[in-house]
Image (cartoon, rainbow, N blue to C red):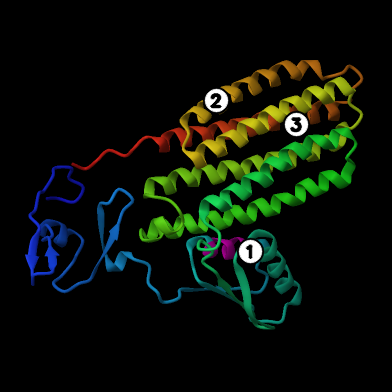
Amino acid sequence: MAVGSRRPDFRKVQVTGGNSFVVSLPKTWVNDVGLRAKDPVAVLVQPDSSLLIVPRRDIRATSKSEAVLEATQGLDKDFLLRHFISYYLAGYDTIRITLGRSDGALRGFIREGIRRKLVGVEIIEESTGGILTQCLSGYVDLPLKKALERMAIIAGGMLTDSVAVLQGGGKGMASEVIERDDEVDRFYHFLLRQLNIAVRDRSVIQEIGLTSTRDCLGYRLVVKSAERVADHAAGIASQAENLQNLPEPAVKKITEMTALSRKVFDSSISALLRLDGKIAEEAIAKSKDVVQMEERLSSEVLAPRMSGAQVASTKLMLEGIRRAAEYGSDIAEVAIDLTVAEPQSI
């Protein structure tokens, strides 16, 4: 039977030695995946009681993987941090940065970037010539779904507080909302790392709380949408700083629109974690109400005495609130997709 064929290939269970049960593997499959006699394979029990047979080379090696980044003279520090994060997302266990020179400012920038942007990275060695970091697996103590739930709580709170700036929170409150975006980014990168490892090593999928590679694809879309909600919340807070003299009725309407947008987002996350199609459908319907509210408020809250900058800030703020609801709708659609069982191969 060729790899990928959906035709059943029935084989009898044989008894050998009186206590062991044996099933032969299709020769075509063995040849296609490059197995030879006495090569080890992993047998993984699936949630539906079926078995998944995986060549050992497809299982993540227990040996530690290390990446090395060389910081050459004149290298942009943001470039170096981006590439460090790329190795983190790829699933490397240790990442070494070699500086080749004494540069305390660059080391400080990298340390701060790791602290602000990443979860589970420890600096285990540091000298004038470089930094050695270790990336902890993390999914045992912080399962993927729990991490996503925490990420969503922070993003949702940012969305609510971003509009509270209109009620007199001032620049201090806006800055506090914007700073929380770093915490969301930490969970975002952490979740992407776990999903990338799971796609490469199928034995990890169940360890992080999912059931198949299809789940990994769906959650990849979800965590990006949740990260974008936080980005929009930070943008809303920034725009709200310019609009603290809005009339109370306008502030009230914008606050109501934001509350509905957050409800869409919260409901979509709940639908995903519970795999509840009904909640997901309700969230999608409410997102359309948010779109209608934006269209109506775009004219209602604009006042003749507003400056051009205030008009622009108002429109950008309303657009951000609407986009947050639309990202929630995207998450709800993924939740609906994952409620549908995958077709059986036989």
Mark 3 or mark 1, which is nearer to you? 3
Q: Nearer the viewer, residue 295 or 340?
A: 340
| SS at mark 1 in the image | helix
Left or right: 256, with 18 as reference point: right
Residue bearing mark 1? 81
Q: Residue furthest front?
A: 18
User: In 3D space, how far apart are the residues under numbered discs 3 and 1 (Cα atoms)?
Assistant: 30 Å
Q: Residue at x 74, y 31 (%)?
A: 316
Mark 2 or 3, nearer chain start: 2
Residue 315: give x, y in percent of width and height: 75, 26
Q: Residue at x 65, y 59 (%)?
A: 117
Of the 4 image quadrants, the one containing the C terminus is top left
Residue 29: give x, y in percent of width and height: 16, 57
Residue kind at label 1, given as amino acid type:
Leu
Tag 3 and tag 1, C-beta contact below 8 Å: no
Residue bearing mark 2? 282
| SS at mark 3 in the image | helix
Mark 1 or 2, nearer chain start: 1
Mark 3 or 1, nearer chain start: 1
| SS at mark 2 in the image | helix
Task: Specify whether residue 87 is painted magenta.
Answer: yes
Residue bearing mark 3? 317
Tag 1 and tag 2, C-beta contact below 8 Å: no
Q: Nearer the viewer, residue 318 or 81?
A: 318
Q: Residues within 10 Å of mark 1 (few under 14, many from 20)?
A: some
